Structures are given as C-alpha cells and as structure tokens.
Image: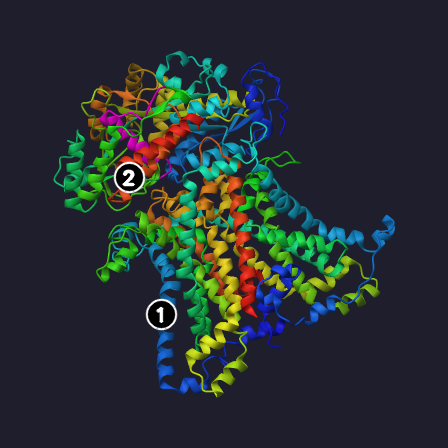
Amino acid sequence: MATTEARLLTDRQAPDTALVSSADWRRPAVRYGLGGAHIVLLVLLFVAGLGPILWLAKAAITPTSDTLSTPMALFPHGGTFDNLRHAWTDLRVGRYFWNTVVLAFGSWLCQIVVATTGGFALSILKPKYASIITGLLLTTLFVPAIVLLVPLYIEIVHPPVVHHSFVNSYWAIWLPAGASAFNVVLMKRFFDNLPREIFEAARVDGASGFRMFFSITLPMSRPILGVVSIFALLASWKDFLWPLLVLSDTNGQPLSVRLPAIQAQTELGVFLAALFLASIGPIIGFLIFQRSFLRGSGLSGAVKG
Amino acid sequence: MTRTVPERSSVSVTDPTRSTAPPAAASSHEDGAAVRSQTPRRRRRFGTPRTWVRGGGLTSLLFLLPMLLIFGAFSWYPIVRTVIMSLQHTNLVQPATWVGLDNFRTVLNDPLFPIALKNTGYFALLALIFGYPIPLAAAVLMSEARRFRGIYSALAYLPVVIPPVVAVLLWKTFYDASPQGVFNSILGWVHLGPYPWLQSQSWAMPSLVMESTWANAGGTIIIYLAALTGVNRELYEAAAVDGAGLWHKVWHITMPQLRGVLLVTLILQIIGTAQVFLEPFLFTSGGPTNSTMTIMLLIYNYAFGNSLGGDYGAATALSLMLAGFLALLSLVYLRVTRSWST
Amino acid sequence: MKSRSITGVVAALTAAGLLASCSSSGTKAASSGSPTAKTSAPAAEKVSISVASLLPGSTPAAVKQFQAQVAEFEKAYPTIKIKSEQYQWTGPTFAAKLAAGTLPTVFTVPFTDGRTLGENGQLADLTSQAKALPYFSKYNPQVIAEGTTSDGKVIALPTAAYAQALHYNRTLFKQAGLDPDKPPTTWDEVVADAKQITAKTGKAGFAEMGKNDNSAGWILTTLAYSLGGRMETGTGKASKATLNNDKTKQALQILHKMRWDDKSMGSNFDYGWSDINQAFSAGKVGMYVSGSDVFNSLVSTDKIDASIYGLSTIPIASDPNAGVLGGGTLAAVRPDAKDAEKAAAVKWIDFYYEQPLVDQQGAVRNAQTLKASNQPVGTPALPVFDKAQYDLANTWIKSYINVPQAQMKSFTDNVFGQKLAAEPAASTQSVYHALDTVVQAVLTQQGANIDSLLQSANDSAQSAISQGK
C-alpha cells in the first residue's frame, strides 16, 4: 500500500508516459486544443468549486438588504461583521459547532475501536467462526441504510433491555455509528496484508493477543487508521436524518440539524453567515489534510465495489 | 508492481462473495498477502474451557466483542426487526398485532407510491445524465494536466467537503425565484430568465439534481483520477509508437481500462440516487404538488410525517421493497456486466 | 413493552401509564412524585418540570423576558423548578417527539389537534387540576370544548384564541398609492390592491402560504370559509368531505387570477408559516393571511419595523355561511407526567398563560415584563373567556400597551361583527394536507385542472376521515 500511496502522490509530477505523450504535446492541435480545454476546465472548476463558497463568504459580511436586492454586487453599501456576530451570539452557532465536534469525535472513536478490534480478531486471531461473522458483516454492506431507520429509531426510543430511552443522548449517535461494516472490512483487509511472519514470531515468543494488537498491529496501521478516520469524521459531519430524529433537544443538536430548523426565523444575512461558519471547519480541515482526503476518497469508490 | 490500490482492495473486499463480485474482483493474480494468509496457522480446538482459553479463544472473543455487540444491536437486530415490523401494525402505545401483508398492500395502494416511484426514477435518470459523464470527462482531462494538478482536484473536491445540509440551504438561496435571486441575477446578465427553479413542477426536480451533481461530482472525479493512475502506461506507449491519435487512445485504451471502475460507480450511483432524501426534504418537502416526492421521503412521511403518529408498518414495508429492489438490481447488474469485463 | 400500570383511581391514568412505562423520560423530571395514587405531592417536595418557552430563533430580548417570567414563577412557587425549552409545534416533528417522549412537560398544540390527541390518550388528563382553577367555569364554552374529550376529560387548557386576519404592509400600500388606513374589504379589492402593489413596487401584492406542511391547506380553508364554503359535514368518522365545493373552487380561482393573470403573488410559493412572517417583516409582501396574533412572532423572531404593520379582518362574502376561520392554542401536559408534575404544570399554565387573562395582578405583571424587553403588549386576540373579561383585561394593561393599536383598528373594530367558524372537526390535518397539493398545483402550474385536483383531494380527505386518521 505504501508504494501505491507514494505513486498517487508523486503523480503530480506528470510522467512522460501518460495518455498524452510528449510527442502529442508537440503537435500544435493537441497543445492548443488540450491547453485550451484545460484552461476552460480550470475556470469552470474555479467557478463551480470555489464560486459558491466565495459568494457565501461575501454574503456573510454583507447587510441582508443588499444581499436581497443585489445578490451579485460586491459590497454596494460596505461590509459588516454584524451578521457573523449575530450568528455566533444569537444563533449560538459556536455551541452547535461544538456539539458537532463532540458528536464527530465520539462516532470516530466508536468506529475506530470496533473496526480495529474486529478487524484484528477476524484477520489475525481468526477463530473458527470468523468466516461466519465476516459473512454476516458483508451482508450488511448490501442492506441500504434506510432499512434500519425505523427499527433503529424505535430501538433508541424503547431499548429492549435497558428500558431507558436514549433519545437526546449522544450515545444514540455514537454507538450506531460504530456499526460500519465498510470500516471493519477495510481494516481487516489491511491487516491481512501485514506480514504474517511477524505475528508468528510474536506468538512463538509468547506474546498475548493484546500485546500483538497494541504493540505490533496498531503501530503498523497508521495509514489505514488515517483513511478510516477521515471517512468517520466526514460521515459524522454530514449526518442529518439520524441526529434529526434522535436529538430533539435543541441545545444538543449539531449544526446539520439546527441550520434547517432556524432558517425560516432567521434574517437572510445572519443565516448565510451561520452557513459560512458551519462550512469553515470542514474546509480548513480539507486544506490541511488535503492529501489524505483525496487518497481516502479515491480509495472509497474502489473499495465499495 | 503495477496493481493499484483500487483493484487490490476490491479483490479483497468482495472476496468471500466472489460469485457476485464485480469484474475487478475476478482479476487473475492472487497477490502475495492473500497467499500468506493461507499459510497454515496454529490449530485451536474447542476442548475443555481451559484449553479454549489457553488456545486464544477467549482473547478472540474479547476482541470480537465490541463488534458483535455494536453490530448485533445496531445492524443485525434492526434488520430482523424491519422484517417483523413490516408484517405488524404498531403505534408503539398498544401491543403490536400481526397483519400479514397488509402494510405492503397499503403502500402499493397509496396513490403517492407510483408518483414517488416515478420521481425517484426520474431523479436517478437525471443524475445519471448530469452526474456520470461530467466527472469522467473532467477526470480524464485533469489527469493529463501538466501543471496545477493539485489545484484541479482540490477545486473539484471542495463542494464535497461542504456539509450537505449547508450546501442544500445555500443552493436554496441561489434558487430564489425572484429576478433578484442569485441564479436569476446571473442569467439576467445574458438576458435569460427569470426562471422559477424550485417553484415549478417541471423545474423542481432538475434543480435538485443540479445541486446534487455539484455536491457529489468531486468525489467521483477523485475516484476516476485514482483509477486512471492504474491504466497501464505501456499500452499508451505502444499505441503512440503505432501512431495512434489521441481519441483513439482514449477510446481504445483509457476507457476499456477504466471499465471496472466505471461499472462499479454506475451501480453505486444508481443505488445512491434511489435513496435520495436530503434534497427533496430540505429543498421542497416533496412539492410542488408532489413533483419531488421520492421513495425515501415517502418512507419518512409514513413513519415521522404525521402529527398524529406514524405508520411504522408501511414505512418498514416500503423500506424492504426498496432494499429488495436494489439487491435484485445489483445482482442482475453484476451478472450481466461480469461477461463484459474480461 | 408491558405496562406496569399505575394503580391510580383516576381512570385516565391507565392510558397515560401505558405511555409512561414505554417512553421513559428523556427530560429528566426530578422523580419526586412516587407512582402512587396521591392527588398531589406534599408541598415540601421539589418538582422540576420543563416547559415550552418561545419559538426557536427568538430574539435575546424575548428570551430575557421569558426568563424573567420563570424567575417570578419560581419565586412564587419555591418548590417548583422550571427548565425552559424552545419549542415550535409543527405537524411533522410533533409525532416524533411524542413517540420519543421528548416533549417538554408543558407544551402547546393548536386547537386543530388537541381533541384528537386527547382521545388517543396522548395528552395527560388534567381534569381534577383544571377544575380546581377558580375561573374554570368561566371559559368560553366553545373554547374549552377544544380541550375536552368526548367523555368529558379536560386534556388541555386554552391559552389564546385568534381569528384569521389580513396582514398588510402600510408602507407598500402608500408606495402603491393606496390608503393604508383603508385596507381592502372584499376579495375583489384584495385582488385589485395586490395588482396595484406589484405594479407600483415590484413586490408581491398578496402572498400565500404554499408549503405542504398543512399550512397551504389551512389558508385555502380560510379563504373558502370567507366565501361561505365548508370542508366537511357531519361528525366524527361519519363526516363527509366536501373539499370540492364551489366556494373552494372560487377561492382557488381568485388565487389563480392573482398568480397567473395579474402576477401579483411574487415568485415564491413555498412559504411556510414562519417563512411568510419573515418575508413580510423584510418588506417583501404586501398582504397575507394568518392568525390575528401573528404580530407577536413578527416582533419576537422577525424584528419587524412596527410602522409598516397593518391588520385588518378577512373579507367576508355576503353568503349566509361565510365566516372567519378561528383557532387557538392549547397548553397540554405530557401523558406520562406524574401527579406532582401535573400539579406543577397546571400551576405554570395558570401563571404564565391564564393569569394575564383573568387576574389584574397577573395581567399587569405579564405586561410589565413584556414591555421591559420591548416585547409586544396588546396584540389583538379573541376572548378565551367572554368578551367582557377580554375587554376588562385590556383596560388593566392599558398603560403598557406598546403595539401600534391604531394600525390594527380595522381589525379590532370589525372582528366581533364577523361570524366565527371552527376548523373542520374530523381529520383536520389530513384535510389541510390534501388541500396543500391543490394550492401548490394552482400556484405552480398555470394549466392546473382545479376540478380534478379538488376531486382527488376530496377522495384522500374522505379516506382519512373514514379511517380516523
């Protein structure tokens, strides 16, 4: 995996043996045609990818009346930080942002624990019944999430054993998040690729399962932990329907649930400022961890297949 | 070693279900790791509890425990519950009663069901028309860029990073149907519009698809980009030596080599769009006049949309029908496409 | 899901108990009241309840005002602790909250749903606590009936009543060359004024809620009533749906003319209750129809500039059946509330909602607190008790009134001369929901076939009525 990773990253220094060869590039038709297409593409990507976000940033610091009457004008009557301030204080975007972070962190932790321990047991320890469990895991990959919605909701409201509603408890988000077969399978696959000799040697030395897990497996798994982490955090950040159903106390809701709820009662400029604040976090995260994001995303499509 | 991450991973993930696995899984090489994993391991016998513990049985179980508990409670059990609930009538207050296939009948007789079915199909079709070729073309073009390649993919991926709820609410502002709306202002510069966007039965669905394509295309582009790095470059060289033109290379080398990934993203996209919920829920609540009512929204409305209590039976029955349909579709799809890929 | 049912003497507790054991509390009520059949908890025991406070998105001033009320209450009842939760009744979220047991102990429901929820055992029985209120016998019989089940249990207390009214923007009226002191009194005038407003200002002359959360159907019903139509005849499950009556058709034709011929309805047709308030406060709407007490929300959540606000009655046609649709709000209690919580809840309802209506001291205290936070005092409503009591209460708070009463004169002068009609009684929400689709079709499709749309709406409403949904 490390080599392919390196490949993905070093690809940016365009190798000569690409679809369009150096010889092709020397032909004027290709050079200008393709060059032109690239410029068009870059402009389009710029407009489509960055345009809406730049507009949102502009609207966040423009008085509502200007955004309403001339949405495309650039600060016709100057800028203002009032919207952002109102969004932060009156709408308490900061609080919901924090809720979102806490929810994401808990879901991440739960997913990592389940995926690493489960993947380790299925791949390295391999009890006899491992194949049955793996099979059960794989079937859940084929069941669309929607099937779980209603029974899971009822289970949270009226849990069978505990008789205490988990509605409004973050556990209602964290624990179900752990049930991601995709993560376990990804992890198991990675562990499968670790050199067996190390584990055999450790076993001969009398290392326990726990030692093998903490001292050998985890330290070697940093790349895959990164990928799973990004999936987990992104998924949690994007989750809407489930928190909408199980977190009804407004104080504990994440941004994704809160924003639609306040839209109708909120002045447009303030609301757009709130939207802007809600997107800053993920954007900054993306800019910092860009490579991991793109690598993970490239991987996801293929692995899901 | 020319194998790429995607191909390798897909081999393993689908390994145990190889009979129904997508084409990529059928690739011939067994890679080293898989061979290694088949080296004989220590035998463990379930004799007495003590030998079981000593043989590592307890450790294995302890490691499996978090997964078994979480999946048991939040995946396997609810799946079984769905099947049971679809055959029951319950309002959570009185004890549930068995009603046979009544819930399925309720759904099939609901005048909204054919509408939702049609709309979901329409959404999927439009999403395919907008969302399938555009990322592919963009990815092929981007992979040939000699400069700023990082900027291309960053720009393309940026919308994917925006939380979907934020994206929808932002686009709802863009879709303001007054001449002062964002899109109508822009189109007004070239004397087009104003268009009704979400305020018209014929415009609403394409508007939803446009936002959805914008929000999701970046992810698909990145997948294609990753796959493109796995295209065997020697073939290009050979073709170049033979004097093949650019289009020839695209059609006869790039596309065939991407076929595995293309087939997978196609079925994934269909499965994803069949479950579209966020866009119709937040943009239009299914309106105007049910023109954006989708299957998922109907399920939601059955369960949670009525102020006097939900029809959980109908909701689970429809969920099962959707899941069954998608499973069937995937199976048929994989059967049919398997023969194309080798 | 078996209920270890409370062995209460109060018959209704059985129903409540079923829910109680299922939906154990998400809101942690201090478990003071033991589940025995005590009628009230000893005074020394502490009770904590959660109460619905304001709409989500209320201004800090409005929140401050509410907190002041809570502080006053806790001072008066030191054993009761109040936790406030922002709350808005919407059809789609209510059922989920009810099922999940996450409603506050005290919450509000519209008249529309009170009785049905009560009959279903989804609201706590407040009969004994309510009847102990000194003013219980003075409730307007029609109004208290909205909170009483068919077998005579009181399951909710009315807190406010309103008549549907026409809200208009005085500034836009002036800009359009119309007299803001002479709002339209017939639908023809509404249509003409709307056209003129759009022509002169470019704004929507008349806007209409069009969202399929039952608000579109609610407003269409208002229009049909004002022309003399009714949506149902008969009672209960035997009711006959009459959605496709001539007056509903006429109402739709009025909308169709404004939307497509005059193009005076602006460009957004999916307003919900809150959205249209916001659009109106932002000056984008000339006229719209909503409850007469909406001004409170326009101030507390939408920061309206009060000088643009005008309030008038709905135009009533000469038809003998023509009337104004009325409605109101009920305060209700979670079905699983224990006796001590119920007692505390009714004390809160009494203090926060009812005292300002019946007691001079309560009215003044309420008005003072509201005024101190620049919240509206004196917004016109309909009497929950009788007209004399309503007028009397208004004289108590005369010196605190801060709403522009002169701009509401056309409403206050005329509303009591209007025939007040209640909402369709059977399957109200389903009737509205069926009509949502029709309104959306007329507003978004020029060639919409009103007859066939109404026919299919009628069919689905009829089937909902027969099934008691």
Q: Secondary structure at mark 1?
A: helix
Q: Mark 2 is on which residue type? A: Ile
- Reading the image, the residue beneath label 1 is A43
x and y percentages locating residue C240 in the rendered image: 35, 23
Which residue is located at x 54 percent, y 61 percent?
Answer: B336
- Reading the image, the residue beneath label 2 is C304
In this rendering, position of residue C158 left or right of residue A68: right
What's the mark number on residue C334? none
Kindly indicate the quadrant of the structure image that contains residue A51. Answer: bottom left
Q: Residues within 10 Å of mark 1 (few under 14, many from 20)?
A: few
Q: CA distance from mark 2 to mark 1?
A: 42 Å
Kindly indicate the quadrant of the structure image that contains residue A210. Answer: bottom right
Part of the protein shown in magenta: C212-234
Give the answer, above or below, for where A137 lies relative to B249.
Answer: above
In this rendering, position of residue C132 left or right of residue C4: left
Q: Are marks 2 and 1 on the same chain?
A: no
